Image (cartoon, rainbow, N blue to C red):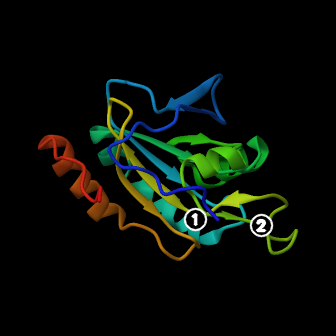
Amino acid sequence: MTSSKPRVGAPVEILDFPTVDREGSITIGQPKDRWTMLFVYRGRHCPRCKRFLNKLSDALPEWVGAMDVVVISADSKEKALADKEEFGWDFDLCYGLTESQMRSLGLFVSEPLSEAETTGMFAEPGTFAIRPDGTLLLVDISNGPAARPDLEELLDGMKFNIENNRPVRGTA
């Protein structure tokens, strides 16, 4: 069970995520020059995640024209790097999402059904739009692999929100 629902309009907890293909990490929740879209995926074991992330990779130039894109799972560096190499993803791919980070984002956390699935706790999918000031504008969280946002619709809506400096909705 999640610890609490993420609060839109509130600062996102500052979290650091190591990346698979460069030194250092990516940090969310602190002020920066651009918007960030954070996508959390279940991990290498999830074929639905691969289809979703392949679509994101295909549309990536349009996405990065509007905001930074960060993708993360609880997978090890080796598993995440294997996915990146297999599918040729160009987005910033991070790994090692901890259970406490999952819970701070309000994600649903699952135990593997078997070792064939994966060997540790993992997060169910989540999407977070973070303003340059580090506050959360939009959140979409699923408790299973079958529910994902439509990437084309999401990008169109985010461009509108950014260009028109739309306020946070759904706060009550």
Residue 69 appears in view? yes
Q: Is 112 positioned to the left or the right of 18 in the image?
A: right
Q: Is 54 positioned to the left or the right of 151 in the image?
A: right
In the rendered structure, which amino acid carries the disc numbered 2? Glu
Q: Is 148 positioned to the left or the right of 104 in the image?
A: left
The residue that mark 2 highlights is 111
Residue 13, how many percent across, how many down? 51, 36
Q: Is 20 positioned to the left or the right of 169 in the image?
A: right
Residue under the image location 58 percent in, 65 percent down: 49
Q: Nearer the viewer, residue 33 or 88?
A: 33
- Spot the residue most to the front: 172
Residue 49's disc is 1
Residue under the image location 67 percent in, 43 percent down: 95
Residue 57 appears in view? no
Q: Is residue 107 positioned above or below 38 on the image?
A: below
> Do tag 1 and tag 2 residues touch (Cβ < 8 Å)?
no
